[in-house]
Image (cartoon, grey):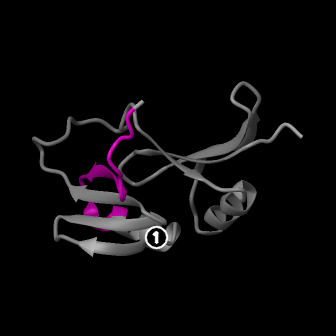
Amino acid sequence: MSVHPQIDQQITFFYTHNLNASTEFYEQKLGFELWLDQGTCRIFTVSGSGYLGLCQASETSTPPGDKQLGVIFTLITQQVDEWFEYLKERGIEFEKPPTLNEKYNIYHCFLRDPSGYLIEIQRFETND
């Protein structure tokens, strides 16, 4: 079995029609720090070498629609309930409150960012 070349960092990019609203959400609500400002794209540190990039969309770069289908941005933490309370205090509405998902043995909740992207906050449950 061959060893693949090293991956140093990972960035997930979202297109947004309102870069300022999305920037405010990820900076002020989630507390992510701006790592690199490229003008029409802003990259935030999520954890370690994991990043989220927000890019201003043009009318031709993304299809119209109120929900960004097929994408879930998942944040892994042991503090799901703490994040839920923290974000509720900041006016965030959740699509699903913290719930145990027995099928996948996870505890998670869901919310959406200003561009309609689904965000999941979850922890993996242990079978002690």
Label 1 residue SS: loop
Instruction: Decide: is 125 above or below 114.
Output: above
Measured along the vertical axis of the image, is residue 27 above or below residue 120? below
Q: Which residue is most to the left?
A: 60
Of the pair 10 and 93, the residue shown nearer to us: 10
Q: Residues within 10 Å of mark 1 (few under 14, many from 20)?
A: some
* Image quarter (top left, top right, bottom left or bottom right) of the N terminus: top left
Q: Who is closer to the viewer here, 86 or 120?
A: 120
Which residue carries the number 1 mark? 32
Residue type for callout 1: Phe
- The residue drawn where x is 38% and y is 34% is 2
Question: Who is closer to the viewer here, 120 or 77?
Answer: 77
Where does residue 47 sit, x and y in percent of width and height? Answer: 50, 64
Tell me the residue at 72%/63% (across/down): 82
Residue 34 appears at what percent x and percent y?
A: 36, 74
Q: Is residue 119 left or right of residue 18?
A: right
Quadrant location of residue 60? top left
Across and down, in percent, residue 124 comes to 70, 43
Q: Residue 37, how many percent across, how many down?
A: 23, 73
